[in-house]
Image (cartoon, rainbow, N blue to C red):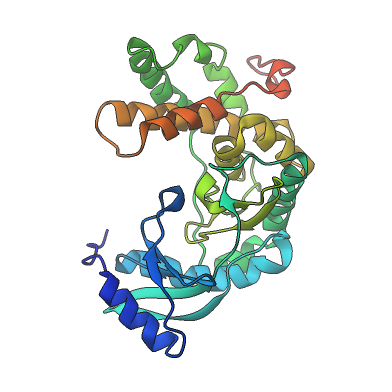
Amino acid sequence: MTQAATPPTADTVRRLIRSLLPESGPDVRPVTECGDHSSWWVGSRHVLRLAPDRDASVRLRRELRLRDAVRPHVGLAVPVSIAHGEWGPGLGYTLDTRLHGVCAEEQDISAVGEADLAGLLTGLREVTVRQAEVLGVPRVAPRNLDTLRTAALRAAERLAESDEFEAAGLSHFTAPAARQLATQPGGAVLVHHGLRGEHLLVSPEGRVRGVLDWSGAVVGDPAEDIAGLAVAVGAPAAVRAATLAGYGARPCLRGLWLARCDTLLRLTAHTEGVAPGPLPLLQEQLGRAWEAILLERVTEFREGAP
């Protein structure tokens, strides 16, 4: 891990903007919406993103190439960079067009918005694994769901002691169920890997209009994006979108349980003072991931079942 640089000041940002947009002189202010503290609004039309360290700079440069590759396929707006370079030694930046909408944490999506998300998941599969890897997107092995389940059980017990969660909710997610939801060979696809609420821009009508921050994209388990959507927009909407995109019961249920275990672990880490973050948001995310879906009600897990 590389050491983070000294955070840029407003004066640093203004000098950079004057060199990029010398005739405009727009207002510059930090982005604080949806918990984003690493970007700056530049007037009403642009956003400046500054990588805090060299590793982030590598991901940012890769993201510029990846956005061009996914844009024709996903059916949603993806930021366009009008300038990019270094704001410090080895530290990258990109000045992007601003996409309009509010983050999914602040606006519910509609049924048509679920179709928008289905188009996103479908479009990600249309970028081939070979194409993604040529762009430098790393391949990541799928997580072991039984290991995650074991950690989530311990987290649920600790949360139950403080009345934050009813531990019995995990009782029907057994070890055989976790094994049955293991990934299948050959199932890796391009995964955004950051479909959190702050990265999904939603219109007042509930349409999903844009997708931000492709820097964490990987080639890997598509259930990770289904899990992200379950946390961002709720389990039922996420599973409906994934089903519309052609995913079957296994990846949908795998994504559901990834989301549920992850939210338990994040909330536990916060309550124990290990991880930062606003407690109300973590509680809301836990509630969204644990919303019941019809698919799990009609799916029976049995040892040895296909």
**Residue 196 in sight from this viewpoint:** no
> As displayed, is residue 176 above or below residue 280?
above
Q: Is residue 280 left or right of residue 239?
A: left
Left or right, 168 with reference to 99:
left
Residue shown at the point (72%, 63%) measured from the top left: 73
Q: How many marks?
A: 0
Specify the quadrant of the image occupied by residue 247: top right
* x 62%, y 26%: residue: 180
Residue located 69% across and 19% down the image: 305
Residue 236 found in image quarter:
top right
Locate residue 52, reporting x and y percent: 31, 65
Residue placed most toward the observer, 262 or 47: 47
| Image coordinates for residue 199, horizontal then vertical, percent | 53, 52
When the figure is inspected, residue 20 is found, relative to residue 304, above or below; the finding is below
Q: Percent position (x, y) of residue 115?
A: 76, 46
Which quadrant would the C terminus be assigned to in this image? top right
